[in-house]
Image (cartoon, helix red, strand yellow):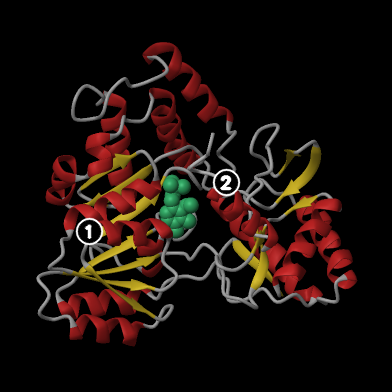
Amino acid sequence: MSDPLAYLKEELAALEEQGIRQHPRVLEGEQRARTRFDGRDVVNLASNNYLGLAAHPRLKEAASRAAAELGAGSGAVRTIAGTMSAHLELERRFAEFKGAERALMFQAGFTANAGTVAAILTKEDVIVSDELNHASIIDGARLSRAQIKVYAHKDVDAASALLAESADARRRLLITDGVFSMDGDIAPLPGLVEAAENAGAIMMIDDAHASGVLGETGRGTVEHFGLHGRVDIQVGTLSKAIGVLGGFIAGPDHLIEWLVNRGRPFLFSTSAPPAVVAACVAALDVMRDEPERLRRLWDRTRFFKEGLSGLGFDTGISETPITPVIAGDETKAVELSRGLWDEGVFTPAVVFPTVARGKARVRTIVTADHSEEDLGDALAAFERVGRKLGLI
Ligand SMILES: Cc1ncc(COP(=O)(O)O)c(C=O)c1O
């Protein structure tokens, strides 16, 4: 019998040939600084577990208790029968964390971004977007059917010019990632906020990699730049520094009430189970009670970055715990990743089309859980493999 999906086999073979087919490694224990993937014990520089909360005892305990008391699933979408008091408690806590009037939980950061952009704009509107914004922003922009205008990475003047030339649009949205996930650099938020204010545009920031990481108390890019009250929509994820799963929108009451009525992932997808919600609340407690985690994250980040640049590696323009080690062509990046793996260090290769050609790299992410010994071992491995490949 003929297989109408057979063409996918050829597409997969093409991906394999280009070296860009995904073969995810399998984590065989907890998400930790040293752990086991595919049967090998490694220093793990691949996760987004910035504060080391994914396996924190208080989160595990909260999740177990919630599952025992409230069950494994919520059983419905939020607007039908799936709103539990735990969801409301987490939303109240997250609004407080972000200094916003109100917050709304989504099933993921991806659906928070995509669902919100699609819910607040229509085809009469214009979206002005950084060229390196996350895929979920791009998908939301496409779903909204608004016109999408892309500016060169972090170019505030270009963003202002696009806002100005769109003055006759019904509404305009200026949108940026707070921390860019492939280079670890920070958006020029003060300039963008000013541009949005001058144009009367909505300002939205995706703080997936900044929540829990940037700012004196880890509240994100708005805190980092002291821009409280000047960003209309803040997106957060519960899946990275917070260590669990889910997404968030924080903003004014009327925005949240609109998303309750028109945010499609909120309306048409089942809400998070009690264990997830309770673990997220526990994560916010731990962030409050153990501020040394944030300090340790940045101490370790500085230690590792200095080590890499001291060895002579090209670490690009990173300003955060995400540090790329740029190898240049695709093959070199894959060889670097493989060589490090053989030496007991897990750092995935990132190649075209995720990053530009000639900028292929391995991406490292330091967490508060890494000890100096873990990072020292990783640096020694980088030195051996980097020399072998002629990168340093
Ligand atoms: C910049 C950015 N935004 C949004 C997301 C989506 O977040 P989540 O993993 O919670 O869906 C990610 C994560 O992959 C991200 O890197």
Above or below residue 117? Residue 72 is above
Residue 237 coordinates in the image, percent (x, y)? 41, 47
Q: Quadrant of the C terminus?
A: bottom right
Helix, strand or loop at label 2? It is loop
Q: Residue at x 81, y 40 (%)?
A: 40
Q: Is residue 89 left or right of residue 282?
A: left
For this view, does 253 lie left or right of residue 84? left
Question: Closest to the observer: 223 or 34?
Answer: 34
Residue 65 position (above or below residue 137): above
Where is mark 2, residue-wise? 49
**Furthest-front residue in this view:** 1
Pointer 1 with pointer 2, Cβ within 8 A: no
Residue type, mark 2 in image: Asn
Whether residue 137 is visible here, answered yes or no, is: yes
Whichever of labels 1 and 2 marks the residue nearer the N terminus, that label is 2
What kind of residue is marked 1? Ser
Count every numbered label the image shows and give the total. Answer: 2
Q: Which residue is mark 1?
A: 144
Q: CA distance from mark 1 to mark 2?
A: 31 Å
Q: Residue at x 51, y 47 (%)?
A: 291
Say which residue appears at 68% left-offset and 37% top-offset: 27
